[in-house]
Image (tube, rainbow, N blue to C red):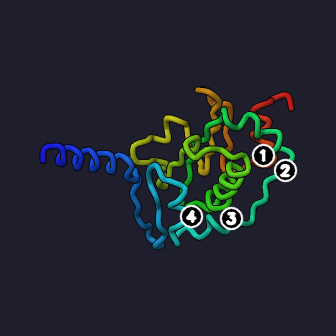
C-alpha cells in the first residue's frame, strides 16, 4: 500500500509539471487572450484561434533559403512572443511555424509565450528579452541571441534568419 501511494503521488507530481503554464482571459470584445507559456497545439486545436490554421495553410516557405538553413537549424532555438489579440501576431506566427516545420525544428527548440496587452506573461517577463512589440521571434544559437524579427520580417522569415546566421549576405 505504501508503494501504491508513492506511485500515485509521483504520477500526480509529474502530471502537474506538464500542465499548461498559461491562463486565458477574454477582452471586452470577447476575444480569447492566452497569457504565459503556450504550446502550439493550443493554437492548432482551439477554435478561437482558427487564424492559426488558415495562416499556416496559406504560407509557402521559400525553398532555397530553407534548404540552405537546414544544416544549421539543429543548432538554433526560437522564442516566440505573441499576442493572440494582435493582428500582426495572427498574420506572422502561423508562418513561423510553417517555416519551423520546413526546417524540421524539434518542438523542444521552440518556446512560445502569449502576452497580454501590456506585453507581460505568466512566469516570464517579456521585459527580460526587451519585448515591446508583438510578435517578436528571438533566434538563439548556442546560448547567444543572434537576432530577432519584430512584428514583421524585413525580407521574409527565411531570408531574415539566413542573414542572422551569415551577416555578410
Q: CA distance from mark 4 to mark 2?
A: 24 Å
Secondary element type, mark 1: helix
Q: CA distance from mark 1 to mark 2?
A: 9 Å
Q: Position of residue 61 (x, y in %)?
A: 79, 54
Q: Nearer the viewer, residue 124 or 140?
A: 140
Above or below — where is 168 with respect to 31?
Answer: above
- N-terminal label among 4 and 1: 4
Secondary element type, mark 3: helix
Q: What label sits on residue 63 in the rendered view?
A: 2
Task: Residue 49: tell me if it is visible.
Answer: yes
Secondary element type, mark 4: helix
Neighbour tally class for label 2: few under 14, some 14-19, many 20 plus, Cα within 10 Å: few
Residue corresponding to mark 3: 55
- N-terminal label among 3 and 2: 3
Q: Nearer the viewer, mark 1 or mark 2?
A: 2
Q: CA distance from mark 3 to mark 1?
A: 16 Å
Residue corresponding to mark 1: 158
- N-terminal label among 3 and 1: 3
Q: CA distance from mark 3 to mark 2?
A: 18 Å
Q: Nearer the viewer, mark 4 or mark 1?
A: 4
Neighbour tally class for label 3: few under 14, some 14-19, many 20 plus, Cα within 10 Å: some
- N-terminal label among 4 and 2: 4
Residue 60 placement, left or right of 139: right
Q: Position of residue 10 (x, y in %)?
A: 26, 44
Amino acid at each position: 500500500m505504501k508503494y501504491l501511494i508513492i506511485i500515485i503521488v509521483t504520477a500526480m507530481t509529474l502530471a502537474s509539471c506538464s500542465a499548461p503554464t498559461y491562463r486565458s482571459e477574454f477582452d471586452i470584445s470577447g476575444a480569447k487572450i492566452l497569457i504565459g507559456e503556450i504550446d502550439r497545439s493550443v493554437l492548432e486545436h482551439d477554435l478561437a484561434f482558427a487564424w492559426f490554421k488558415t495562416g499556416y495553410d496559406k504560407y509557402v516557405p521559400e525553398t532555397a533559403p530553407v534548404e540552405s538553413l537546414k544544416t544549421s537549424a539543429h543548432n538554433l532555438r526560437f522564442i516566440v512572443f505573441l499576442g493572440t489579440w494582435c493582428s500582426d501576431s495572427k498574420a506572422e506566427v502561423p508562418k513561423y511555424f510553417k517555416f519551423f516545420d520546413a526546417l524540421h525544428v524539434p518542438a523542444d527548440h521552440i518556446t512560445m509565450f502569449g502576452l497580454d496587452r501590456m506585453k507581460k506573461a505568466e512566469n516570464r517577463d517579456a521585459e527580460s528579452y526587451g519585448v515591446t512589440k508583438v510578435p517578436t521571434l528571438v533566434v538563439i544559437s548556442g546560448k547567444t541571441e543572434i537576432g530577432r524579427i519584430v512584428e514583421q520580417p524585413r525580407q521574409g522569415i527565411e531570408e531574415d534568419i539566413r542573414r542572422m546566421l551569415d551577416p555578410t549576405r
